[in-house]
Amino acid sequence: MRVSLRVNDVPFDGEVPARLTLADLLRDRIGLTGTHLGCEHGICGACTVQVDGEPARSCLMFAAQADGSEITTVEALADGDERLHPLQQAFYEHHALQCGFCTPGFLMSIEPLLPDVPGMDDEQLRGLLAGNLCRCTGYQSIVEATRATAAAGAQTRQVTAAVPAPGLSLPRLLDLDALVSGLRGRAAGWDVRLALLDRDDRRGIAHLQADARARTGPGRVRAGIELAVDGEAGLLRARVSARSFGVALPDGADRPLEAYLRELVVAAAAPIDPARRRRR
């Protein structure tokens, strides 16, 4: 069967056996052998890669299941041959690897969650690492390297904004392609995903999570977004709590947020093209 996907921002399109795993595709067909195979039962975590920004066991996933996805492997972390990703550098400095077989899986599991690490206690952080096994280090050095990386490059910021939105309803707002495409359009150079966590149509409130990964460099942003349609006041309100790693969150972020909300209100007033209706 034919699959089309992107691996480390490079397109792959080709025929693969239906039962070929993503790990075997990466290693044998594409030549990215940094993804290691250990137990091949999804227990050890050595084969972990990122599928659309989230850690996934490549030994348990068929290549066909990744059709249309963006795959990131450990080879994408370093900036060329000279500059390591800050997490890789911290593993080196804190002696968080010995034989190194498990290291790619740890790196790919930890990297997308670096913005969240400063708010974790030791038990939570060890829980984050529990899906990856290491027979050499005793884990403490991995915990230390993870904390050191996050402490050096993590930020948090809260931003609020409100714009006029007479007659706007929450169902109408959440049915928009513009909700996602507008956010991506404002994040040039970033891969952005937006997920709806929950909604309350009666109260006019929705909670979303935005995840963004820089196409170059170690930047990561994870943001919780609350959208509230205030029918009585005729306003669309937004509250964003953003956590970042490797990128500075700019001052005055309320202004682009306000502009984004205005775009959504304009889009909500336009007729919805059924062919472009978002699938929920």
Image (tube, rainbow, N blue to C red):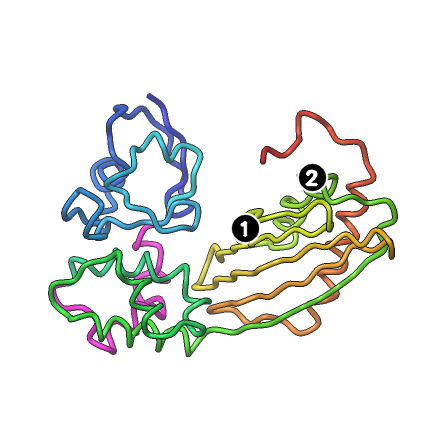
Percent x, y of residue 258: 76, 60
Q: Which residue is mark 2?
A: 176
* Quarter of the image where the C terminus is located: top right
Please say if 22 is above or below 190. above
**Quarter of the image holding residue 177?**
top right
Q: From mark 2 to mark 1, how far is it between C-alphas?
A: 16 Å
Q: Is residue 42 left or right of residue 70?
A: left
Extent of the magenta region: 73-99
Q: Which residue is mark 1?
A: 192
What amino acid is at disc 1?
Val
Specify whether residue 97 is painted magenta.
Answer: yes
Disc 1 secondary structure class: strand
Relative to residue 156, is residue 16 drawn left or right?
Answer: left
Three-letter amino acid code of the residue under disc 2: Leu
Residue 151 x %, y %: 41, 78
**Residue at the extreme top:** 1
